[in-house]
Amino acid sequence: MNNEPHNTSNGEPGIPAESANDLALVASAQSGDTVAFDTLITKYRQRCFAMIYHMTRNEEDAWDLAQDGFVKAWKSLANFRGQSGFYTWLYRIMTNVTLDWLRKKHIRGGQEFDDTIGLRKIEPAATTAPKPTMEPAARMADAEIRQRIDAAIEKLSPEHRAVIVLREIEGLEYQEIADALGCSIGTVMSRLFYARKKLQTLLQDIYEQL
Amino acid sequence: MNNSEPTLTKLEETLTAYLDGKLSPAEAAVFEAAHPEVAAERRQHEQLRAALAKEAPALSHGDFFNHQILREISPAPAPLAVKRTAFPLWRLAVGAAACLLAAAGIFFTFVGPQKSRNSDYFAQVLSVKAGDPDITAQLVEAGGVAVVWIDGLDALPTNYVLE
């Protein structure tokens, strides 16, 4: 993948400035510099949190899992050789942490459907904040749609949920999804196909309102 | 679920590629012509994708988020190294106990009986002088200093001189 903006080169041909900067920070962190790692956390926490949130549909869980992911990344830093970008590597860790958590939750609770899912408090900076001009009825409909989407995604298996989030929201290519999930492109396409079919069935009645 | 997902048929695979914009315009046109229903499916898919993309809450309490991670990963303070010395604590304790025993032995061998004798002498003198059996005295001598302990008197008479 790369959603990372590739800045101008910092003198090293072929190495985007941002990646070079990341690699410098990673090198410091690998020698035990927690300040450098703190900078990396600040840089990527929102993207990691958003990705995990889309998979868990819960802000608190996403917050905790993103923290777990960063702690795991710190512990595995010695294994990072710079063959991929830091964020790609981090992304893989975050995806695996979340998938493991979803699988455990799935085993414990079976196919969950939480009817109590309500309107989450929307942060001022969130792109989901209702438009000020939105009429109350429209806002209610918007909230209802969000609830329905949350519920539909919760009905998906962890693997199906992951491919939907990575493809539809994160915009990853098939190969990048395959790398992140440790499976083949064929498996990615198969999961996408069946996950979409399921969502289509679950959300059939609200497609007109989307 | 494992990696052995159901294999897609050619149609399903092409539909997936079509929805993801992986077909060239010419391939997409051929596919739509052969399967007119897929155009509606593509519209639905785009609507769903847009609805999904709407949700992107901001991570709250970012500083606290970092702080907790850093607390978790910060190296724990190294345990204080135990220095090996020629005189470990247990040896010092045993040495101190031995010294105390030796001092006590010397005291009771040489000082104890003398004190006892002096105490008896003073007790006898006081009993004669005071005429009160509740008044007792003892003398402790150590390091060239003699201390007289007298019990049983509320106060010494102002004109009393110990000779």
Image: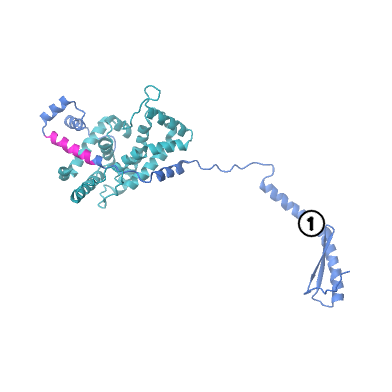
Chain colours: A cyan, B blue
Q: Position of residue A122 (x, y in %)?
A: 29, 47
Q: Residue at x 69, y 44 (%)?
A: B87
Please, is residue B102 above or below residue B129 in the view?
A: above
Q: Quadrant of residue B57?
A: top left
Question: Amino acid under label 1?
Answer: Gly
Residue identified by numbered label 1: B105
Label 1 CA crowd tier, 10 Å (few <14, some 14–19, many 20+):
few
Residue extent of the magenta highlight: B37-51
Q: Residue furthest right?
A: B163
Query: In the image, A54: left or right of A21?
Result: left
Q: Position of residue B13 (x, y in %)?
A: 20, 31
Per the image, is A171 magenta? Answer: no
* Secondary element type, mark 1: helix
Quadrant position of the C terminus of chain B in the picture: bottom right
Query: In the image, B33: left or right of A165?
Result: left
Per the image, is B50 magenta? Answer: yes
Q: Residue furthest front?
A: A133
Residue nearest the observer in this picture, A62 or A210: A210
Please, is residue A122 above or below residue A167 in the view?
A: below
